[in-house]
Image: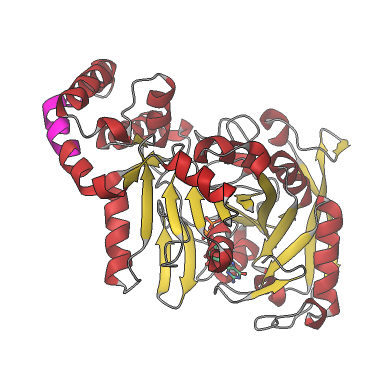
Amino acid sequence: MVRAIVGANWGDEGKGKITDMLADNADMVIRFQGGANAGHTIINEYGKFALHLLPSGICHPDVVNIIGPGVALDINALLSELKVIEERGVPAPQLLISSRAQLLMECHIALDTLEEERLKDRKFGSTKSGIAPFYSDKAAKIGIMVCQLFDKDLLYSRLKANFVKKNVLMEHLYNEKPFDADEYTEKYYALGQKIKPMVADTTPIINEAHRSGKDILLEGQLGALRDPDHGIFPYTTSSSPIAGYASVGAGIAPHAISQIIAVTKAYSSSVGTGVFPTQLMGDEAEELRRRGGDAGEYGAKTGRPRDVGWFDAVATRYGCMVQGATECALTNLDVMSYLDEIPVCIAYDIDGEIRHDFPVTPELKKAKPIYHTLSGWREDVRGITRFENLPAKCRDYVAFIEQNIQVPIHILSNGPKREECIFRKNPF
Ligand code: GDP
């Protein structure tokens, strides 16, 4: 079976935890897009890990982890993550890197950083990991594929061509030193040699695994609302976090994907710049931020405080629709236990009109949330393993969300640890 685990919202929904948990029974976990620009937090018997580039099956020695062709491969970031894994006593993982993935290099990080600085208050809230310059190169066909790393002459000619336009920007827009193709050739050739044993044409391997009935997880990064086509453009990312793209970015037929699990939190959170109608401010926000996630709502990549707000059923219903979600995983349910009342956004007021659809960004900026308020349950729900044992008001909250997003919630997560889950339908 092939299933995609993707975000229904702005990212940070808890996909890493759900993937790590489902990886227990999986044979293969594949990252299909994005790079080291966001983080997945997983907590298991080896401790807590903030993974950026490594697939979330990395702590399972029997799982084949794959970095697919759609990923922005920052070799330096990958090697440091692998080092952490090794130092923390995780058994040697099985990791394959697609020879068709492309390289995210230091020049991309430099350009991303310089551009955000240049934009000042018009900046996009980038994590400065080089993602937009990387995907620009890919679209312009001047990127470097992993398979081009092992031939020094080819690598040099690709870098030389790549730097022509970049160096005009470096010298004349940013007033910085130009990139040197000789220096980059030496550096990246050496890095290429380090990853060579892990490089493979992963597409036939994935397809063969599927043909022989293996259990495959496709792991998305960020969420539907960060998609360049369907999200809150321009506060989006540069690759598609949509399950439909999982097929492209991993290299497997679209009809092979039989389950799409959209992950959403019991409240909303968003890191970076963007439009976020249910955003809370002041003390209310501070309290939810402090109680959220495993150690407060702070970005796994940047440590930036995440914006937090009430659950937005309009945005999530839309996110689930564009993901093509067959089911949902609702995480961080335990976080809501402190509240007497819990508002849920069920519609937007835009210029006096009640809207149930998720509008384009200029309209979304004007959206005022319309809330339906439910009673809180004021009881710790961590440690509960059966849905029936949750307090009635907690079950009502789940049912209300389910009804409003129009997708069945099969997995509930009531704590950050791998085993803190309630299955309403056995996922295995
Ligand atoms: P991802 O990028 O979608 O994997 O999400 P992140 O890992 O960036 O953010 C999710 C946060 O929620 C992390 O701090 C997780 O440890 C935490 N988390 C996930 N599920 C739960 C849960 O059910 N309860 C609590 N309290 N924290 C959770």
* Quadrant in the rendering for residue 319: top right
Residue 186 counted in the magenta span: yes
Colour logic? secondary structure
Q: Is residue 102 left or right of residue 106?
A: right
Q: Is residue 275 visible?
A: no
* Quadrant in the rendering for residue 142: top left
Check the image and report above or below for 24 versus 345.
below
Task: Tell me what residue is drawn at x 70 percent, y 48 percent.
Answer: 258
Q: Is residue 3 left or right of residue 177?
A: right
336 and 1: which is toward the camera: 1
Q: Where's ligand 1: which quadrant?
A: bottom right
- Rendered-image quadrant of the N terminus: bottom right
Q: Is residue 195 left or right of residue 313?
A: left
- Rendered-image quadrant of the C terminus: bottom right
Residue 165 counted in the magenta span: no
Task: Tell me what residue is drawn at x 42 percent, y 58 percent.
Answer: 51
Q: Which residues are magenta?
A: 175-188
161 and 212: which is toward the camera: 212
Percent across and percent down for residue 69 are 44, 37
Percent across and percent down for residue 226 are 58, 39
210 and 398: which is toward the camera: 210
Check the image and report above or below for 335 versus 123.
below
Percent across and percent down for residue 89 are 31, 74
* Quadrant in the rendering for residue 387: bottom right
Task: Tell me what residue is drawn at x 40 percent, y 26 percent.
Answer: 138
Percent across and percent down for residue 365 are 68, 35
Q: Is residue 412 visible?
A: yes
